[in-house]
Structures are given as structure tokens and as C-alpha cells.
Image (cartoon, rainbow, N blue to C red):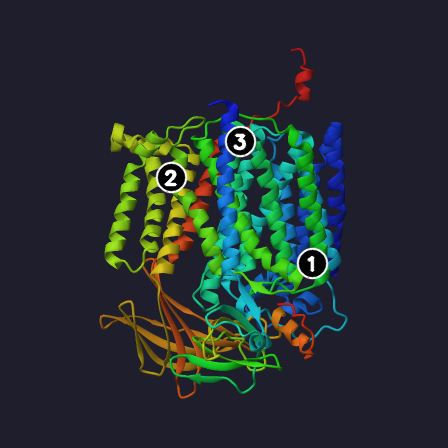
């Protein structure tokens, strides 16, 4: 009965989304206040209904209700409670429900907190969000219903894929979805602005917090996914240029460009064309990503269940939304009036450069991801595009961008002085150069690109710090007074510096972990030792162990440095009983920012085991940098100017009109 | 600078960057993509030794030999032809005799494929689409190629 309630709630939400798609938009176009006022309450109600639906499904999982097909396919009564809960989104139907939940959640947020928005913009935006909701709730109900019941419930479920039974699963998809789906709001804002024919600085000011929010979560989601793959898959890799990874990277690149464009549009009312187009593109890329992952088009470690019917549906949705919005854009582009002018060398110019490189990099990833699919569909020829392609295209495109990053915030608006900007960055440049020389000296000439990469990373980091220091005029007024000025700096200035510092940190991690990594693959018998990066790794023996829903073979290793025992590691190989599926559990020792990574391979009989040992210097910086970036974004969102800046529309109070004569 | 000159400069600079990006992408596409070959393709086309390819098929039953230093050798077949493969490293969990596998590497001058990458999807019932197509071409239909939901 409850399951049916959950199902019905979804159907109700669908009906409401149809209403939402039409009524407020009509109200906005005909300036009917009452029709426009329909939007916020409907958006909140839709959220409550879908939330109810989601809670019902979660309840079914937690109770191991095997009369629900979805629970049977993806759960097991012996599964730990946490994974019963997170297993809700470990499959196609459940994760799609989560997707829709976040979609209507953002709609509700705009409905509740969009008090500053002009009423017609708010109504139209919520209508467009309603179109998207209609499409995806219909998709859920028609092809991916999580509430399908079984007439004869089986005694036990099929268990969740063991690789997904991990805390990373609890965090990665929700974070990612808030990012992906968050960009739906900027899309809705953009389409609404095009429909109403009004794009101005105020619009950009309203769009920016939502973009920042989605971007922060997407950054964290991608980082979490990378870290999860790193420790869960047992190969020590953290980015595989897998089509599904690329499907999340592309909206991130476009979203970063959008973020920066919105800044220009807000300050100088320029770059309208870029901003609106990027808003459309970013969400379109999210939709494309959804299509790629769920349609069965891809062969990948990540891909969900293949089903052509679902693929066709999403493809239709894709064509409608992307095609429709781009057509609308082409038709209404003339309403985007030319804004403030600027010289090529200026902050705006720098941000245009930023956009160019980010979109080119995004295009490179796009081509690399879709070209094999296209080729396979048209000629049947099967190729694979992997890391070598991306290293050749993505890398060289990001390098000039990274070199320009410290310049951006120190150039003036409208007409910048490159020489003056350079003078402020002397210290940063000097530090970077010093790092390059030191790295060369330490590692000799064997690795040429690595020292340059390290230097680039330090340049970006030092540039971010320089920017803050020059803002507080530390050299002019002395350190003590500068510190008090630090607290007076606007939030967005700190946000920028912290986020730019974060990308520098990530680049540093990427370069050192890739270039200076050490690896050993050996067959070890109890008592054998392997020497790596100054550590001595000794295999003591393997023993079997039993978990809640798995059996494992645990290898015991002792790590010594200079004869002193530092730690003991226990990597293992597990077999999950329900699906008879093996997984590898790596064991990681973190020292400073570097990691020693151990994973087991085959048992050879006679006690011998294949072992893979890595030493990855400074690798945690990759993910720490992403967290720093997200923190920077968060600081920017918290900037009161962003939220208060837009003037409230004047409200006529009925009481004032009829003031009683005293 | 006049407004027109400024616009032209910006468009010019944008054009240069885009052209460079496009050039890079096209060059990389030509140079860096890796073709998928079946054992029959390898037998018939005489792939030049040293060219990087992906080799896929079924792991021939009884062909897996493990030696010291994490070396392993096996044979990949599409029931018509077979290619011997060597690999140094840890095999993925789902690697099994009689199951589908895709490996990436280089054919040595002696006809042995030296793999530096062995791929398997995390679903034991799954045969990579490329391998299934190859098998279908041989008339060897091994049941549904639809994977179970993960």
C-alpha cells in the first residue's frame, strides 16, 4: 500500500509539473499576477511529493521489501544498513528518482528564496524548470519506474554490486547530482531571460549564486568520484578519461566558464552572448552526460544497465531541450544588447581568454568522448580514445590558461595595464622559477616536463596569494595594518583567491603523482620484501576472514623505513557471497600528502601472492585542491553583496493605501 | 583603437586559439586513437609489430599460465583464431577463462601480444560489446548480450 502511495505521489508530481509548465509562463506573458503567483507554491508541493516518493523507496530498501522489483535487483537482507540506504541510488531507477528529487528541490528553492526576483522572471524560470521536470518524471514513470511490484516476492534479493558497497557511494552520486542538476536552474534562468527578452546585469547577479552552488557541488562530486575509484578499484589510478568521467568533466569546464562570464556580465554588462550560451551549454552537457551513462551506448566501467528504450527516451528529451533552447537563442539573440566595451588587455579580455580556453578544452573532451561512438554508429569501426589523446589536447590547452590565471584578478576592468599587473606578480614568478630550478636540480634532466609542471602549479598558487597581499597593500602600509584589512576584503575576493589557489594545488598533485610515482609488481611469498621509495614492504602471510556479506583473503604486510616498523597494512580480496563477485580492497598508508598504496592480486597457491605496491608523492593534493576550490566557491556564495545587492521590488501594502485618519 | 578594431582583434585572437585547438584535436585523433582488433583481424591483417592496438575476445580455456614476478600468459580467441598474450601485472577481478576480455598493447615481432592493460567491466555476466560483435560475426552466439542491471 505504501509503495503504491509513493508511486501515486510521483504521478501527482507529474500532473503538477504539467501545470507548472504552462500556467506561470502564460501569466508572465500576459502579465497576470495571479497566474504567476501559482509557480512558487506548486514548486514546493512538487518537491514535497517527490520527496515522499523517495522516502517510500528508501523505506522499502531499509525494510528489505522484496515485493518491489527494484529492491530485489539491488539489495540483500544481509547488507549493512548504510548500504541498504545508499543502495537506493546505486541503480538506474533509484538514481533517476534522486535526479528528479534534486531537480524539483532547486525549483522549490527558487520558489521559496527568489524573493528578490522580478515576478515574471521568477514565474518563467519556474515554468522552464517545470518543463524539465515534466520530461524527466515522465521518463521515470514510463520507462524506469522504481515502484514496480512482483506478484511472487522472492526470499532474497540479488545484492548491490560489491564495488558500490562503500562509503564513497554514499557521497559521490548525491554530490554529483546536485552539481549536474543544479545547472538546470541556470539553464532555466537563461531560457526565461530569452523568452522575456531581458538580459541585464541584474539577471547575472541573480544567476551567479546558483551557478556557484552547482559548481561547488560538481567539483566535490568529481573529486569524490576520483578518490573513490582510486581506492576502490585497486589499480591506483584516479582518472581514466572514461566516457562517464568525461561526461561530468564537460559540464564542469563549461560551468567554470559560465561562472567567470557571469562575473563580467554582472560588473560590466558585457559578454551577454557568452553567458547565456554557456548557461544553455552547461546544462545541455549535463543532459548529454545523463544520456551517455544510461542509454547503453557506452562500454565503460561506470555505465548503468543498458536499455535501448530508455536511451531513445533520453535522446528525445535531449533533442527537445538542447535543440529547443538553441533555436530560441538563435531567434532571440537580437535582444541581447551590446554591453560595456573593453580593451583586449583588461580583466574582461582575460575572462574572454579564459572562456575560449575552457570551451576549447571542453570541445576536445567532447570530441574524444563522442568520436568513437559516432564512428561505431556510422561505420561500425571500433576505436578507443584514451589518455594519450587527452594528454595531447587537454593538457596543452590548459597550460596557457593556467599561466594566465594569476593575471586575471590583478588586471583592471575595461582597460588594463599588463606591465603594472606583471609588477605585482614578480614575487610569484620568482618563486615559481625557483621551484623549477630546485626540481630540476633534485631530479636531474630525466624528467623535463615535470619541473615545469611543478613551476606552473606554484605560479598559480603564489599568484593567488600575491593577489590577496596586493589588495591589502601589504608593502605600502605594513603587515600589522594589512592584517586588519584582510578581514575587510569582500567575500568574492577571498573566494577567487582561495579557488585559484585550489586549482594550483590540484595541478601540483597531478604533476607530482604522475611524474614521480614509483611502482613495483611482484609475486611475493611470506617473508619476502620489496624495496620502494625508501620503504621496505614485507609480506607476512595471508589469512581468511569473514565479513557480513562477504568472505575475504587478507594479506598482512609490514612497512619499515630504515629498519623501524612504521605501520602494518592489510589489503584483501573479497568474494561477495550473493553475487559470487570478487573485489579488491586496497590498503593505503598516508604520509604527509603522499601515499603508499598496496593491492593484492592472485593467490598462486603455496602461499605466494601477486602484489602491487605504489608510492604516490603528494597525490592527496589532487583532491585537497578540489576541496579548496569548493571552499573558495562557498566563500563567494556567502558574500552578502551577491544576495542583498539586487533591489527588492517595491511592495504596495494595502494598509498604506487606506491610512485611517487619526 | 576604434570599436571595430577592438572587435576584430578579439575575434582574431579567438580564431587563433580555436584554430590551434582544432589542429591539436585533429592531429591527436589521427595519431593517438587505438583500433580494436579481433584475433582473426590480427591473423589476417598482419598488424605491423609495434603498433598499439586493442585485442579482444574470449580467454581460451586452459590457456592461463601464471609465472613468477606477476607474469601471466594466456590466449585470446574468437573461436576462429587465437593470439598468445603476455601481461605483467595483476589481472582484474573479473578475468576468467571462457569470459570476454579486452586488452591493450603491442604485438611483438614474434607474434606474441604484449599487453599493458587488461580490461574487464564490473559485471560478471557482461561481454564487452566489441567482443560480442566479434563473436556474433563468427556465428558463435553466446546468449544475450544485454547485461544484467548493475
Residue pointed to by mark 1: A311
Where is residue A179? Give x, y as percent. Answer: 55, 48
Which mark is first along the chain, 2 or 1? Answer: 1
Packing grade of label 1 (10 A; few <14, some 14-19, many >=20) is many
Query: Which residue reaches farthest top?
Result: A661
Please give left or right for residue B64 compared with residue A374 in the image. left
Q: What residue is drawn where x is 69% and y is 34%?
A: A331
Where is residue A512? Give x, y as percent. Answer: 35, 57
Label 1 and label 2 in one chain: yes
Please give left or right for residue A493 compared with residue A60 in the image. left
Give the camera-side residue of B86 and B46: B46
Query: Which quarter of the image is occupied by the N terminus of chain A?
Result: bottom right
Question: Dividing the picture into quarters, in which one does residue A587 lie?
Answer: bottom left
Packing grade of label 2 (10 A; few <14, some 14-19, many >=20) is many
Residue pointed to by mark 2: A406
Element at label 1 = helix
**Subunit ID for the residue under disc 1:** A
Residue A68 vs A128, above or below: the answer is below
Question: Dividing the picture into quarters, in which one does residue B72 lie?
Answer: bottom left
Give the camera-side residue of A154 and A276: A276
Label 2 and label 3 in one chain: yes
Give the camera-side residue of A618 and B117: B117
Q: What residue is drawn where x is 72% and y is 72%?
A: A153
Question: Dividing the picture into quarters, in which one does residue A589 lie?
Answer: bottom left
Which mark is first along the chain, 3 or 2? Answer: 3
Circles 2 and 3: CB distance less than 8 Å?
A: no
Which circle marks residue B87 in the picture?
none
Residue B39 vs A65, above or below: the answer is below
Residue pointed to by mark 3: A265
Element at label 3 = helix
Give the camera-side residue of A591 and A505: A505
Q: CA distance from mark 2 to mark 3?
A: 21 Å
Amino acid at each position: 500500500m505504501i509503495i503504491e502511495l509513493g508511486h501515486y505521489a510521483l504521478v501527482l508530481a507529474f500532473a503538477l509539473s504539467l501545470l507548472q509548465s504552462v500556467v506561470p509562463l502564460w501569466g508572465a506573458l500576459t502579465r497576470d499576477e495571479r497566474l504567476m503567483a501559482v509557480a512558487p507554491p506548486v514548486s514546493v508541493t512538487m518537491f514535497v511529493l517527490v520527496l515522499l516518493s523517495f522516502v517510500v523507496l528508501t523505506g522499502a530498501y531499509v525494510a528489505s521489501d522484496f515485493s518491489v522489483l527494484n529492491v530485489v535487483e539491488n539489495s540483500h537482507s544481509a547488507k549493512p544498513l548504510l548500504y541498504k540506504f545508499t543502495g537506493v541510488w546505486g541503480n538506474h531507477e533509484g538514481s533517476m528518482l534522486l535526479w528528479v528529487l534534486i531537480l524539483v528541490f532547486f525549483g522549490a528553492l527558487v520558489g521559496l528564496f527568489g524573493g528578490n526576483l522580478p515576478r515574471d522572471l521568477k514565474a518563467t524560470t519556474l515554468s522552464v524548470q517545470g518543463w524539465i521536470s515534466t520530461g524527466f518524471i515522465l521518463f521515470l514513470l514510463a520507462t524506469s519506474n522504481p515502484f514496480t511490484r512482483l506478484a511472487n516476492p522472492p526470499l532474497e534479493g540479488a545484492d548491490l554490486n560489491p564495488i558500490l558497497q562503500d562509503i564513497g557511494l554514499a557521497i559521490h552520486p548525491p554530490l554529483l547530482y546536485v552539481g549536474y542538476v543544479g545547472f538546470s536552474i541556470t539553464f532555466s534562468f537563461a531560457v526565461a531571460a530569452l523568452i522575456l527578452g531581458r538580459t541585464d546585469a541584474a539577471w547575472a547577479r541573480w544567476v551567479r549564486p546558483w551557478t556557484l552552488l552547482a559548481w561547488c557541488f560538481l567539483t566535490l562530486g568529481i573529486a569524490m568520484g576520483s578518490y573513490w575509484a582510486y581506492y576502490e578499484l585497486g589499480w591506483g589510478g584516479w582518472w581514466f578519461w572514461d566516457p562517464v568521467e568525461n561526461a561530468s568533466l564537460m559540464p564542469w569546464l563549461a560551468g567554470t566558464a559560465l561562472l567567470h562570464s557571469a562575473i563580467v556580465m554582472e560588473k560590466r554588462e558585457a559578454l551577454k552572448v557568452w553567458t547565456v550560451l554557456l548557461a544553455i551549454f552547461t546544462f545541455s552537457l549535463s543532459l548529454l552526460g545523463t544520456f551517455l551513462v544510461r542509454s547503453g551506448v557506452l562500454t565503460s566501467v561506470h555505465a548503468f544497465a543498458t536499455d535501448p528504450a530508455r536511451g531513445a527516451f533520453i535522446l528525445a528529451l535531449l533533442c527537445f531541450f538542447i535543440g529547443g533552447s538553441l533555436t530560441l537563442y538563435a531567434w532571440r539573440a537580437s535582444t541581447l544588447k551590446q554591453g560595456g566595451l573593453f580593451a583586449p588587455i583588461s580583466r574582461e579580455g582575460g575572462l574572454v581568454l579564459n572562456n575560449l580556453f575552457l570551451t576549447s578544452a571542453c570541445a576536445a573532451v567532447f570530441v574524444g568522448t563522442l568520436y568513437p561512438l559516432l564512428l561505431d554508429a556510422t561505420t561500425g569501426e571500433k576505436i578507443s580514445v584514451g589518455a594519450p589523446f587527452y594528454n595531447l589536447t587537454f593538457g596543452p590547452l590548459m597550460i596557457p590558461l593556467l599561466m594566465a590565471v594569476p593575471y586575471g584578478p590583478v588586471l583592471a576592468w575595461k582597460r588594463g595595464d599588463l606591465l603594472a599587473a606583471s609588477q605585482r606578480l614578480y614575487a610569484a614568478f620568482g618563486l615559481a622559477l625557483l621551484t623549477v630550478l630546485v626540481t630540476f636540480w633534485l631530479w636531474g634532466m630525466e624528467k623535463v616536463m615535470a619541473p615545469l609542471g611543478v613551476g606552473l602549479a606554484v605560479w598559480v598558487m603564489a599568484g593567488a596569494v600575491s593577489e590577496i597581499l596586493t589588495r591589502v597593500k601589504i608593502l605600502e602600509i605594513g603587515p600589522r595594518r594589512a592584517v586588519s584589512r584582510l578581514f575587510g576584503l569582500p567575500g568574492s575576493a577571498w573566494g577567487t583567491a582561495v579557488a585559484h589557489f585550489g586549482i594550483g594545488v590540484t595541478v601540483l598533485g597531478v604533476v607530482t603523482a604522475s611524474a614521480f610515482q614509483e611502482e613495483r609488481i611482484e609475486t611475493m611469498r611470506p617473508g619476502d620484501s620489496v624495496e620502494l621509495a625508501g620503504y621496505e614492504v614485507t609480506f607476512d602471510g595471508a589469512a581468511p576472514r569473514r565479513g557480513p556479506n562477504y568472505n575475504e583473503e587478507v594479506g598482512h604486510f609490514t612497512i619499515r623505513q630504515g629498519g623501524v616498523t612504521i605501520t602494518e597494512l592489510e589489503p584483501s580480496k573479497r568474494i561477495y557471497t550473493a553475487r559470487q563477485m570478487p573485489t579488491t580492497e586496497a590498503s593505503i598508508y598516508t604520509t604527509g600528502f603522499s601515499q603508499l598504496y598496496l593491492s593484492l592480486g592472485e593467490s598462486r597457491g603455496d602461499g605466494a601472492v601477486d602484489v602491487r605496491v605504489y608510492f604516490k608523492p603528494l597525490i592527496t593534493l589532487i583532491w585537497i585542491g578540489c576541496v579548496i576550490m569548493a571552499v573558495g566557491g562557498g566563500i563567494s556564495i556567502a558574500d552578502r553583496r551577491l544576495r542583498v545587492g539586487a533591489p527588492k521590488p517595491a511592495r504596495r501594502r494595502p494598509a498604506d493605501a487606506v491610512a485611517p485618519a487619526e | 583603437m576604434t570599436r571595430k578594431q577592438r572587435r576584430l582583434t578579439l575575434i582574431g585572437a579567438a580564431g587563433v586559439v580555436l584554430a590551434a585547438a582544432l589542429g591539436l584535436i585533429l592531429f591527436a585523433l589521427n595519431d593517438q586513437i587505438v583500433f580494436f582488433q579481433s584475433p582473426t583481424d590480427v591473423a589476417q591483417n598482419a598488424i605491423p609489430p609495434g603498433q598499439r592496438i586493442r585485442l579482444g575476445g574470449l580467454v581460451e580455456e586452459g590457456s592461463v599460465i601464471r609465472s613468477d614476478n606477476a607474469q601471466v600468459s594466456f590466449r585470446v580467441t574468437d573461436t576462429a583464431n587465437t593470439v598468445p598474450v603476455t601481461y605483467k601485472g595483476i589481472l582484474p577481478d573479473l578475468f576468467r577463462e571462457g569470459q570476454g576480455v579486452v586488452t591493450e598493447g603491442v604485438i611483438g615481432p614474434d607474434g606474441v601480444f604484449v599487453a599493458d592493460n587488461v580490461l574487464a567491466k564490473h559485471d560478471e555476466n557482461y561481454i564487452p560489446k566489441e567482443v560480442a560483435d566479434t563473436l556474433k560475426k563468427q556465428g558463435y552466439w553466446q546468449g544475450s548480450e544485454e547485461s544484467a542491471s548493475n
